[in-house]
Structures are given as structure tokens and as C-alpha cells.
Image (cartoon, rainbow, N blue to C red):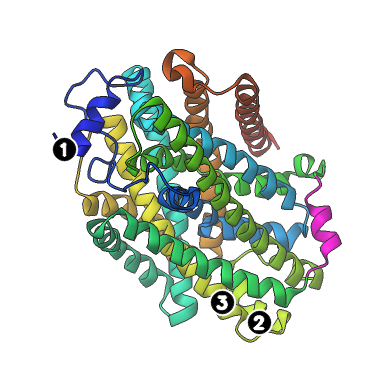
Amino acid sequence: MTQIQEAAAQERAWKFASHDEDDRPSLPEVNSTVKVPHAGSWIRRLIAFLGPGYMISVGYMDPGNWATDLAGGAQFGYTLLTVIMLSNLMAILLQALSARLGIATGRDLAQACRDHYPRPVNLALWFACELAIIACDLAEVIGTAIALQLLFGIPLIGGALITALDAFLLLLLMNKGFRYLEAFVIALLIVIATCFAIQIAAASPPVAAILHGFIPSPAIVTNHEMLYIAMGIIGATVMPHNLYLHSSIVQTRAYKRTEEGRRDAIKWATIDSTVALMLALFVNAAILIVAAAAFHTTGHSDVAEIGQAYELLSPLLGLGIASTLFAVALLASGLNSTVTATLAGQIVMEGFLRLRIPHWARRLLTRGLAIIPVVFVTAIYGEKGTANLLVLSQVVLSMQLPFAVIPLVQFVTNREKMGSFTVSRNIAILSWAVAAIILLLNFKLLYDTIFG
């Protein structure tokens, strides 16, 4: 019996195990393939678990975040920093719950939903998640196309079409091994963080104004335009498909499939994702801070497009390479997001439908659905149309969020499903509160949009 088969057999002993004996573990080609030292220093063990959290953090700083953070900083200064902070804290909690579910039960969130809900509910959840992945892919297509235009002068439509080729990038990395995939992602994250660290140093924003921005303001809820951007930030920060992804890729570690081994794995996976998401908080806050310092305080509050920001950054910050750094970070962000969205799509399709198609076919299908509206909107409305489409995609993501959050919280708070790994009462209350906040904000935004 192979290591994967042995692990799968052990998983079926847990509460969430499928009744189908032919059911395979999540991402079977990489499940339990990364070795974990069962003894030795804590540093060695941390390094062994380091990786999934950074892959998750990619989704929290993808091109969709750029559009909402830029618009928020340019229009409202530092006010929406509090939304970035709160949404990042919600993300840390939800990703920790996702990792707990995957490690404790051996099921990713999609498989857990399939095991628990009737087929009509599963189909509805699958459809909602596919919409979220397409919305995310839409942001990646637009962001990558804009970066290619800014750096190399490639027209937007041409750049959008070029992004279809990224399916082969994932295939190459996956064939080399999951650690190579993680190393690629972390390298690009370092590029993004470095670019923004330099831009913040050049912007020299007032520290007092930044700290004040982290204090909640009632205007965020009462001002419809600010709420729209705030919901976009939440949608861009707390990514619904990331909850499915994280519950799967934490299982790539070959931890002991015992209660003690799982508890240890949950601890290290939670540390990994929390540290990685703090990096995402820095990047998202940096984008908004740079936009507030460069545009809002200089009277350019109408800057909402990435292209505009690129043109104005260097002259306003007085740093010749500021615009280039901005575009390089955008391209790195688009490439990184490609990897995680592809894996999430595979996990969702296999988990809900048990439908397995080649990675390249899955990627081209999803990317094709995202490219079509980008080409259409660009041809008719030009660059401004793609900017509006980018923000709209993040609001769509936010609308899909409850369909992933509610099942996740329901599972991890259910003792019949999780056994001794059920979250504590305080965490359960906090988790349901986060789900309620997300629902209320979504209903408020819908109401204002329809009747306001």
C-alpha cells in the first residue's frame, strides 16, 4: 500500500469520511508528499509546514485588491485602513478554521459539503464557488494584462489573450513537486513586498494619519460609495475559494494521521497561515497608504485606475522607478494568483462533482470564461471599463463569501463532525459573529444598490 493509499484509508475512519470506498483524498497527486520531521527542533518543523499559508496569502493581495485599495486610498485617504485590518483579522480566523477542517477530517471543504448536504444544495454551493473563481480570474486577467501593457506596451486585449498560456506554468511547477510550486509563490511574494516597501519609504506618509485610519469610522457604513469600496476590499481580502484551497493543501504534509499528529499539524499550519496573512496585511495596507499619500493628499482623488496610478506615481513621489516597481509588483501578483486560482478550481470541481479533468483543460476553461468579458468590455469601453469591471469582480467575490463561510463555520463547530477537534465555545461564537457581519454587510450593500 502506498503512502497516499494508507493515508486515505486512515482518513476514512474519521467522521467526515465519504461512504464511497473509491473516493480519493484531496489533490491525490500531492497528498502527504511533503515530509515532516516528527522530532528535532521547532524551526525544522515550522519550515516543513511553511508554504500553504503563503500560497493562501496570494489570494489576499491579487490584482483585485489593487483596484479596491487604490480607489479607497485615493477617494477616502486612510479611512478604509480599518476595513483592511478587520478583513485581514477575519481572514486569519477563517483560514485557521479551514486548515483545522482539512487536517482533522482529511476532507477539504468541498468534499465535506458533498458528504453533508443534499445534492441540490451542493450544486448551488458549487455554482456559487465557480462564480467566485471566475470573478477572481477576471481580476487576474485584467491585472496581468494591464501590467504587460505598462511594462512592455502590449495592448490590453493582447495581454488578456496571453494570460491563457499560464496554464502551462502551473503544469510545469506541479510536475516538479509541490515544494517547487510553493517556492515560486514565495519568491514572487518577496518581490511584491519589496516593491511596496520602497514605495512607502518614498511616499513618507504621516504616521499619525495612518494610525488614525485604523480606527473604525461610522462613515464607512453610512456612505454608500465608501461602503461599496469597503465591500470590495472585504471581497478582495477574504477570498471564498481560498477556504476550499487551504483545507486541501495543508494535507500535502505527511504528518502522522493520529490525534496527536493532527493536533501538532493544526498548530503549525495555523502559525504558517497567520504569519503569511500578516504579510498580506502589509501589502494591502501599503497599496492604500501609497494611494492616499500620493493621490488623496495631492488632490488626485479621482484616481481609480491602475494605469492612472502608474503614470502619476513617479512624478508625485519623486522617485523615478516608483511606477516601474508598481507595474512589476502587479505582474508578480497576477502570476502568483494564477497558481492558486487553478488549484482552487480543481479542488472545487473534484470535491463537489467528483469530476476530474486535466489541469490544462480546467485552467483554459476558467481562464476563457474570464477573458471573454475582459475583451468585450475593453473593446467597447476601453481602460476605464476594465477598471470598473475589476472593482465589480471584487464585490461579486464578496457576495459569494457567505456560501463558503457558513458551511465552514457550521462544520468546525459541530462536535459530531469534528469530535475532539471541535473549536472552543469562544471561537465558535467569534466565528458565527464574523459570518453574521459578512451577511449583514452583503445585505446592506444589496439593499443600497437596489433601492438607494
Dot 2: few (<14), some (14–19), or many (≥20) neighbours within 10 Å?
many
Which callout, 1 or 2, points at the residue further toward the start of the chain? 1
Residue 65 left/right relative to 22 = right
The residue lying at 41 percent from left, 53 percent from top is 137
State the residue in front, 299 or 41. Answer: 41
Residue pointed to by mark 3? 325
Q: Most extreme residue toward the right, as rendered?
A: 208
* Residue 314: numbered disc: 2
Q: Nearer the viewer, mark 3 or mark 1?
A: 1
Residue 1 left/right relative to 200 = left
The residue lying at 53 percent from left, 67 percent from top is 192
Calculate the distance from the C-alpha at mark 1 to the C-alpha at mark 2.
56 Å
Q: Where is residue 352 drawn, in percent x and y?
A: 31, 30
The local secondary structure at tag 1 comes to loop
The local secondary structure at tag 2 comes to helix
The residue lying at 58 percent from left, 60 percent from top is 66
Say which amino acid is labelled 1: Thr
Calculate the distance from the C-alpha at mark 3 to the C-alpha at mark 1.
47 Å
Which callout, 3 or 2, points at the residue further toward the start of the chain? 2
Residue 157 quadrant: bottom left
Say which amino acid is labelled 2: Ser
Dot 3: few (<14), some (14–19), or many (≥20) neighbours within 10 Å?
many
Q: In this view, does 32 lie above or below 288?
A: above
Say which amino acid is labelled 3: Leu
Residue 435 left/right relative to 133 = right
Q: Which of marks 3 and 2 is in front?
A: 3
Residue pointed to by mark 1? 2
Q: Nearer the viewer, mark 1 or mark 2?
A: 1
